[in-house]
Amino acid sequence: MYEQSWEELAENSDNLMEYDARTLYSTWNLSLKQVSAQDPQAAELFRLMGYLGNVDLWYELFRKGAGSAPDWFCDITKSKARFNKAMATLYSYSLIEAVPGLYSLHTCVHDWVLRYLIGKIDIALFGLAIHCIAQNVASESTPKYWLVNSRLNHHALRIEHCQQKEVVDWNVIEIEDIYRIGYLDSMIGRLKEAEAMYMRALKGYEKAWGTEHKSTLDTVNNLGLLYKDQGKMAEAEAMYMRALKGYEKAWGAEHTSTLDTVNNLGLLYSDQGKMAEAEAMYMRALKGYEKAW
């Protein structure tokens, strides 16, 4: 949908589209200049929305991305009232659409923001958009986590769209955010994208913390889970074994992270029909859990 919006309009409208597009661009540019004059932070928020999905934009999505974010963003998300005021300004110039509690951008406006208004990817805004998404990702231990993560699906798709358009320097994106996006992708079945994100996170963790840091090992273990879901059993076993050795060295043989990986190996061997190996892993995990809990 992102790639097709303006291209399809152009193909179907020939020369008329060229005139209409210029008219629309001029109208939107003039509207945004008025917004910038009234509320510069609202204008910057509008640019940020170009890196997110165009529907299901809500206050908490942005609020959780504050913290170490730029001052303008922390200010505009400091309260729902301030956020809604900024969105009301954008709405008054027809740059966004609104229903109670939710905001969206028309597909054509959304495409224009990224392709024509911003042009070359602004890595600071792109990183902030990733941070907002990542900080909203819910783990499997969170009640109704699938509902939360499903709302983030189209925002994750926008990340993929952006990186297809231009090479992204992932070294300047927070490693934890990359890991969380990988986790989100894996939860919603985007396994290829999840693998790419996990590999980026793994390289970042290895460089920043070393090969035996817990964050590194957690990423290795998750890659094992991902490869298993993809049917790549040899790769999954290699990841599990690496994670297991790391956990044993860092945390000991009876740590829950160690035992979880042992159990994962049991599941893997069972799926492969290696019942003796699976039983050995299950028994080891069981004894460890009984002792720990």
Image: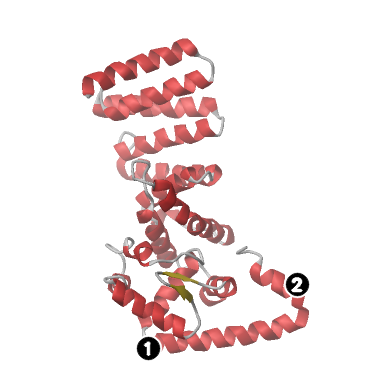
Q: Nearer the viewer, residue 155 or 131?
A: 155
Q: Residue at x 26, y 26 (%)?
A: 255
Residue 102 sits in quarter: bottom left
Left or right, 247 with respect to 100, comes to left
Residue 34 sits in quarter: bottom left
**Residues packed near mark 1 inside 10 Å, few (<14), some (14 to 19) or many (20 plus):** few
Under tag 2, what secondary structure?
helix
Q: Nearer the viewer, residue 262 or 293?
A: 293
Q: Residue at x 37, y 88 (%)?
A: 38
Q: Nearer the viewer, residue 94 or 132?
A: 94
Q: Which residue is mark 2?
A: 11
Q: Residue at x 48, y 47 (%)?
A: 185
Give how far across and how far down residue 283 sits, in percent: 35, 14
Q: Earlier in the sequence, mark 1 or mark 2?
A: 2
Give how far across and how far down residue 220 sits, in percent: 41, 35
Under tag 1, what secondary structure?
helix
In the displayed structure, 26 sits above or below 121; it is: below
In the displayed structure, 109 sits above or below 222; it is: below
In the displayed structure, 70 sits above or below 190; it is: below
